[in-house]
Image (tube, rainbow, N blue to C red):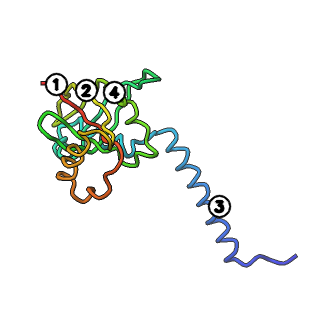
Amino acid sequence: MARQQPDTRVHGVIAALDELRRQAVRRARVHLKMPQGNAIVLAVLRSRAHRLLSGSAIELRYVGRRSGRQYVLPVQYASAGDHLVVWPQHWQRATWWRNFRTPQPATVRLTGRPHEGVARVVDPGDPQWHAARQTYAMRWPRMAPHVTGPLVLISLRP
């Protein structure tokens, strides 16, 4: 029987310890449910530090048209008076904006305060689409060439 080289045994032990560490991290993530992505942005928008993000993102809260569940998500917006324009990025894959094919009530958290409004989809064939796209493009000029497809227009109540 040939003896293993000492280096090979050390590498085997290191590999085993590394695998144990990876398993422990996976188990910890499952138990902790650490906030990621949208949860962090929403937490900032709801906090006193909302000014960090309020100029570019709002919290959009609505009720699903089929499920009846309440949904909350952060979205990038452009403002035009008492109207907000939201472009659903990756609109081909995203489904949330379809809830507003018929006008639906929505609540937005703008500058740290909730505001009631009505949200509806404006398609490229709609006469208001060009004005809404222009509003969004003026606020986000780098995104202007990419803004295609539907826009969500939110009319805030006074």
Upstream in the sequence, badge 2 or badge 4? 4
Q: Relative to 39, does residue 67 appear above or below in the rendering?
A: above
Dot 4 or dot 1, earlier in sequence: 4
Q: Quadrant of residue 6?
A: bottom right
Q: At label 1, which amino acid type do we have? A: Arg
Residue pointed to by mark 4: 62
Label whose residue precedes the other's in the sequence (2 or 1) = 2
Residue plotted at (61% across, 60% down): 17
Circle number at residue 118: 2
**Furthest residue to the right?**
1
The earlier-in-sequence mark between 2 and 3 is 3
Classify 158 as above or below 139: above
The amino acid sitting under disc 3 is: Ala
Q: Which residue is mark 1?
A: 157
Discs 2, 1 touching: Cβ within 8 Å: yes
Report helix, strand or loop for mark 2: strand
Placement of the C terminus among the 4 image quadrants: top left
Q: CA distance from mark 2 to mark 1?
A: 8 Å
